[in-house]
Image: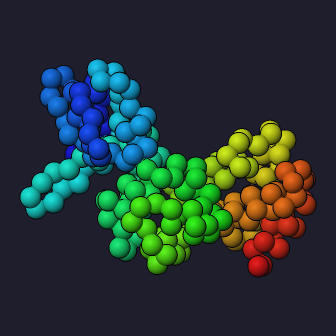
Amino acid sequence: MIGRLKGLVDEVGVDWAIIDVSGVGYHVTCSRRTLTSLPAIGGAVTLSIETKVSDDAIRLVGFASDLERDWFRLLLSVQGVGTRVALGVLGTLSPADLARAIALEDKKAISSAPGVGPKVAARLLIELKDKVPQGAALSDVLEINGAPTPVNVSAAMRDAVSALTNLGYPQAQASGAISAAMKRMDGEASAEQLIRQGLKELAR
């Protein structure tokens, strides 16, 4: 199995790229987001690869990072989600955006991806709420409106999330509750205040 390709961008199509590795051109299917991150033709690139093997073909799917590939694998674990839909989600939402959407149960954000209707979006939120990649939920949700939070606020949020997970709540659910709590409190709160407001969010 191929897990990573390191070479030069040889050609780029609508949903694919050819990566030249020591004279061998590998045809790699990619999300729109990954394709836009590629350097110009002839530029050096490293892609994380998921190898898909079927009865009649071996298909390489490429990603800009290991985290994006991990999300792809999780998306495929959801009933009714295939390669096309999973790449559509990852082409629309960054790993951070996807983590926040799942943690905050934001069906609208998930549904913005091509091929994802209300039923599939609801299934994604239900089945993935406790299955985010290791370390992704907390680190990604600890951003407010897409901007990194100040160090002191992040520390309070981390302490609050830790407290909720110690109470038995899944990390993704706890992260979503604390993120929502911080927004309600205008971005300034102690860990104790966040815990109290986070519990209220979880009780809604």
18 to the left or right of 70: left
In which quadrant of the rendered image does the C terminus lie?
bottom right
Residue in the picture at 66% in, 53% down? 141
Tell me if residue 77 can be seen.
Answer: no
Q: Position of residue 179 (x, y in %)?
A: 74, 58
**Viewer-side residue, 185 vs 135:** 185
Q: Position of residue 167 (x, y in %)?
A: 75, 70
56 to the left or right of 139: left
Please say if 157 is above or below 180: above
98 to the left or right of 203: left
Snapshot quadrant of residue 23? top left
Snapshot quadrant of residue 5? top left
In which quadrant of the rendered image does the N terminus lie?
top left
Number of labelled discs?
0
Please say if 92 is above or below 12: below
Q: How is the image coloured?
A: rainbow
Q: Position of residue 202 (x, y in %)?
A: 75, 74
Please say if 200 is above or below 190: below
Residue in the picture at 63% in, 49% down? 140
Residue in the picture at 87% in, 54% down? 186
**Viewer-side residue, 195 vs 149:** 149
Of all residues, the one furthest to the left in this rendering is: 56
Tell me if residue 107 can be seen.
Answer: yes
Residue in the picture at 43% in, 43% down? 33
Q: Position of residue 78 (x, y in %)?
A: 40, 70
